[in-house]
Image: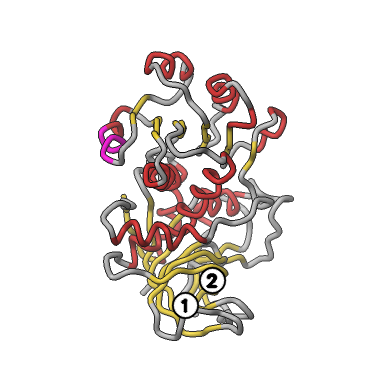
């Protein structure tokens, strides 16, 4: 099969499409004929070597952490998914013609493969962060970095769960966040003052992008236990929850988001789509940090 892979750590130019052995579904897994996958920050951080020592890599390594496609192998113990089903979910080495998924949900007819691929890791990570906060219905949550993939998913899941949401983004994305049901404000230094001007009490906060806002989020909430970060691993020193690989996956949220989408209450914008052979360009765009929603790679 053809797969987007790299033989060494480096820039996006180390990515190339080449032959790779086909994977097969083990117990509790499914294999899909991949139609699309999304680009996540984890993908380019791993490729660049930023995760060396934390995440083991064997070269050549195939990139990709989520996908949407058609089931063509079903492992022992899988319930509710059959050969030929259209699904989306989470796995590894998904930037290939075939990929094994650990967690998956049926893709509703309302979702294209591109949109479904964009929802995988973003939805799971968003729900994982919200679960760590353990907020009550009616609480107010501040999402720092709300316009990207995980931020967009988190905003919509939070609204659907009955929370009030304040989302930070560049001014050009404020109308977008309001359309998702959030109160919008600007990210960056001085956030506590801007939140104070809104006259609301923040019950919990999530740092999505890892640009150093954790101390300000602790100041805003008044308690490090009411802050979660998805991307700042220095937050342990502040007593803040880090939603890393040690936290249980919130795979149930794949079905939750699919049902919300079918009801017209969830959307995941796809800012750009690239073919598999242009996977390097897709990762470069993700690295720029100026993405609304998600970037998707399609597989022939």
- Considering only order in the chain, which callout, 2 or 1, is on the residue closer to the N terminus? 1
Q: Residue at x 46, y 52 (%)?
A: 122
Q: Is residue 131 above or below residue 74?
A: above
**What residue is disc 1 on?**
32
Q: Main secondary structure of the magenta part?
A: helix
Q: Which residue is mark 2?
A: 101
Q: Is residue 120 left or right of residue 248?
A: left
- The percent position of residue 289, horizontal first and vertical second, equals 43, 39
As displayed, is residue 264 above or below residue 172? below
Which quadrant: the C terminus?
bottom left
Which portion, as a residue range, is magenta?
Answer: 175-179
Crowd around label 1: few <14 · some 14–19 · many ≥20 (10 Å): many
- Most foreground residue, 133 or 149: 133
- Tell me the CA gap for discs 1 and 2: 7 Å
Q: Quadrant of residue 169?
A: top left
The picture places residue 6, in percent across and down from the top left corner, at 57, 62
Residue at 41% across, 47% down: 157
Of residues 134 and 238, the one drawn nearer to the viewer in this rendering: 134
Asked if the residues shown at circle 1 and circle 2 are in contact, with their CB atoms under 8 angstroms apart, the answer is: yes
Q: Position of residue 245 (x, y in %)?
A: 65, 52
- Residue appearing at x 55%, y 46% in the figure: 131
Q: Can residue 285 be seen from the camera position used here?
A: no
Q: Nearer the viewer, residue 46 or 190?
A: 190
The correct choice, above or below, for 149 with respect to 262 in the image is above
User: Magenta span has 239?
Assistant: no
Badge 2 crowding class, 10 Å Cα cut-off, few under 14, some 14 to 19, many 20 or more, is: many
Quadrant in the picture for residue 296? bottom left
Let me know if residue 178 is in the magenta part.
yes
Q: How many marks?
A: 2
């Amino acid at each position: 099969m053809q797969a987007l892979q790299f033989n060494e750590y480096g820039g996006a130019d180390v990515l190339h499409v080449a032959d790779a052995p086909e994977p097969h579904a083990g117990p509790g897994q499914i294999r899909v004929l991949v139609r699309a996958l999304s680009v996540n920050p984890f993908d380019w951080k791993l490729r660049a070597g930023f995760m060396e020592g934390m995440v083991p890599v064997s070269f050549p390594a195939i990139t990709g952490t989520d996908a949407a496609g058609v089931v063509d192998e079903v492992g022992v113990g899988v319930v509710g998914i059959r050969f030929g089903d259209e699904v989306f979910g989470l796995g590894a080495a998904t930037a290939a013609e075939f990929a094994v998924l650990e967690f998956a949900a049926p893709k509703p007819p309302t979702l294209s493969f591109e949109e479904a691929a964009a929802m995988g890791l973003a939805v799971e990570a968003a729900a994982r962060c919200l679960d760590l906060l353990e907020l009550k219905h009616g609480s107010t949550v501040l999402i720092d970095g709300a316009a990207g993939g995980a931020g967009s998913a988190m905003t919509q899941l939070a609204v659907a769960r009955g929370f009030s949401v304040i989302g930070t983004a560049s001014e050009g994305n404020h109308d977008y966040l309001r359309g998702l049901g959030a109160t919008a404000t600007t990210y960056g230094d001085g956030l506590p003052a801007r939140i104070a001007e809104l006259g609301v009490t923040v019950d919990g906060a999530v740092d999505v992008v890892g640009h150093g806002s954790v101390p300000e989020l602790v100041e805003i909430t008044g308690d490090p236990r009411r802050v979660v970060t998805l991307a700042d691993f220095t937050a342990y020193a502040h007593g803040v929850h880090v939603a890393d690989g040690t936290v249980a996956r919130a795979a149930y949220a794949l079905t939750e988001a699919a049902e919300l989408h079918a009801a017209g209450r969830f959307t995941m914008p796809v800012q750009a789509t690239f073919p598999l052979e242009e996977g390097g360009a897709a990762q470069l765009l993700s690295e720029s940090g100026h993405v609304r929603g998600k970037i998707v790679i399609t597989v022939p």
